[in-house]
Amino acid sequence: MGITGARETIRACRYCFMCRYACPTFLATKREAVTPRGYALLLMAIDGGKQQWTEDIVRAFYQCSLCGLGREDCEYHWPEDDMVRQAREEVVGTGHAPQAVQAAAAALVEDGRPWAASLSLPASSHGPEVLYLAGCQARERRPEIVSAMAQLLSAAGVRWAALPEEGCCGGGLHDLGYSAEARQKAESLAAQIAALGPETIVTGCAHCYRTLKEFYPAWGVELPAATQVLHSSEYLAQILREGR
């Protein structure tokens, strides 16, 4: 179960509240239940059979932004964000996921993105220098960012392409607690990337960036060995240094 995998973090965090003022959710709500210590105490009670999943407890775990600031602030860098993710896996696995979470996950599984609209980008071609992954939120909510990046890549003379149907990288489903579905999406996207064969994957989405660089290796999802993953800011700095 997810709780068992987070046991060491639970044991550490339940005794300490030093990171609470690094937690944006605590600063907004002033509720101890939504701090790493609060989560650890709740999970210990559930793990010990003293508490059941309730609507309020589930809601508390979905209030966490998974920003990782508690981990960064902690002297020992306990992965409190992973503890919350694993708890959400248990929530999903025991059938306690809120309706809104189920709806968001269903949209990601079915459409590959939580919004229906799409932004037209250059058709993919085999072997581009750069594959640009916009990320679903930029595509749907801030298309001007995507358009600006497209103009920059073209102005620099970069041979680039985008996937015609850019699906979910798996990160959103992973954060919601749908781990199996997240891996399926990750494998699908990795296969599309492998078929295209880019030298570099560039994304402006912090979520996609972390998912491809950190979660894919942890899940055993392989990208082409020669392909590097860069944030758009890293890539733009690189081509500026090259005088492009």
Image (cartoon, grey):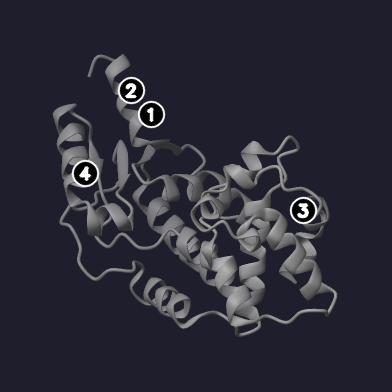
Most distant residue in the bottom direction: 95
Label 2 sits on residue: 237
Q: Marks 1/2: CA distance?
A: 5 Å
Mark 2 or 3, which is nearer the eye? 3
Residue 9 badge: 3
Q: Residue at (46%, 62%) from the top-left corner?
A: 172
Mark 3: give few (<14), some (14-19) or many (20+) Cα within 10 Å.
Answer: many
Q: Is residue 178 visible?
A: no
* Mark positioned earlier in the residue sequence (2 or 3): 3
Compared to residue 24, the image places residue 104 above or below, namely below
Kindly check if marks 1 and 4 are in contact, taking CB atoms under 8 A apart as contact: no
Assign a secondary structure to mark 3. helix
Q: Marks 2/4: CA distance?
A: 17 Å
Q: Is residue 92 visible?
A: yes
Mark 1 or 4, which is nearer the eye? 4
Q: Marks 2/3: CA distance?
A: 37 Å
* Mark positioned earlier in the residue sequence (2 or 4): 4
Q: Marks 1/4: CA distance?
A: 16 Å
Q: Nearer the viewer, residue 229 or 237?
A: 237
Label 4 sits on residue: 145
Residue 174 point in image, percent of width and height? 54, 63
Label 1 sits on residue: 234
Compared to residue 50, the image places residue 124 above or below, namely above
Kindly check if marks 1 and 2 are in contact, taking CB atoms under 8 A apart as contact: yes
**Residue type at the position of mark 1:** Glu
